[in-house]
Amino acid sequence: MSKSQTETKSTQGMRRWVVKAGSNMVLSGGPLLLRTWMQQVAQLRREHNIEVIWVTSGAIASAADRVPSARVKKNRTLSEKQALSAIGQPMVMDLYNLALNATGLLGAQILLTYDDIADDQRRRNFQNTVEQLLAWDVTPVLNENDAVATEEIKFGDNDSLSARVAWVTRAERLLILTDVAGLYDSDPRKNPDAQRVTNLKRVTQELLDSTDKGSGSSRGTGGMYSKLSAAQLAAEHGVETWLVQGDVPSVLLQVANNADVGTRIDAMRRRSEK
Ligand code: GLU
């Protein structure tokens, strides 16, 4: 993608963030946590001039809780996951709409496959839709379009999706809300002296190689590999990433105030001016 193809404008004078919430957070936090998040989205806009594009997971997990024959099954087939996502996506969106409406905000759903970002025309359509929604003060809520995504056209995970969305919408920051407090210098489950990394200048290949690709990682943080890969991609495109624990009170506002929370991963180059 050339720079000109990704050129978009944020609403006048606004800063732009992409915030990604993982399945665990959405499922365990439920309506109450979502409401606190959406209250913060409203506050970010009102008090910090920050507009938010929200990326959420949780469709498949929400449906799996409700479909008895899918509940405990490991190694689901692609068509089972697709069907579960079709059941769970409206459930997740119901939660967001309730939370948004309680805060006086309006939400919009956008479901994407990898092709939608890779193809010039479709990416421009996506960018234009996002710009219009934000101009109307409507919060875009994105997820992968799992129901139609085959392995070839999958982002793979929403960390990757959110990094690409941050890139093509020319966001300033990517926040990944997860169930751990950030990146640690060793596994906090095994080492009581493990320290949180507050700032990472760069996601190196060495760091990625030492991080388990599976759900539990050598750094004690489930799914950290995909988060670091997403942060690396974001950094290459001038986006700063914050890995933060999603259920810490006022976590979004804390990040807006540059508080010492989670792990901040620097962008590798300055974005050109919008
Ligand atoms: N798109 C999936 C869902 O909503 C989640 C993918 C992920 O967790 O990264 O269930």
Image: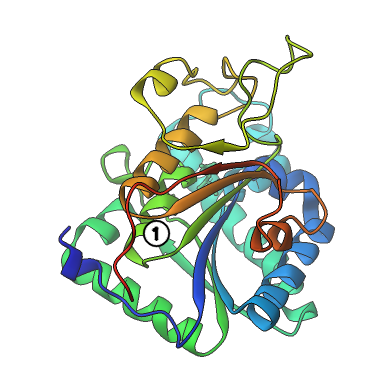
Q: How is the image coloured?
A: rainbow
In the rendered view, does 230 fall on the left or right side of 53? Answer: left
Viewer-proximal residue among 107 and 205: 205
Q: Amino acid at mark 1?
A: Val
Q: Quadrant of residue 9?
A: bottom left
Residue 218 in the image, given as x and y percentages of width and height: 57, 14
Residue 190 at what x, y percent from top left? 73, 9
Residue at the image position 36 percent from the left and 53 percent from the top: 164
Q: Is residue 5 left or right of residue 31?
A: left
| Mark 1, residue position | 165
In the image, is residue 222 above or below residue 242? above
Determine the image quadrant of residue 45. Answer: bottom right
Q: Secondary structure at mark 1?
A: helix
**Picture coordinates of residue 99 (x, y %)?**
75, 70
Position of 229 with respect to 252 (left or right) is left
Q: Name the residue at 50% across, 48% down.
A: 241
Q: Bin the neighbour count of mark 1 within 10 Å (Cα to Cα): few under 14, some 14-19, many 20 and up.
A: many
Residue 226 in the image, given as x and y percentages of width and height = 46, 33
Q: Splitting the image into 4 quarters, where does residue 257 fall?
A: bottom right
Question: Is 153 in front, or is 171?
Answer: 171
Which residue is found at the position 46% from the left and 34% from the top? 228
Q: Is mark 1 within 8 Å of ligand 1?
A: no
Question: Which corner quadrant holds the C terminus?
Answer: bottom left
Front in this rendered view, residue 61 or 165:
165
Q: Quadrant of the N terminus?
A: bottom left
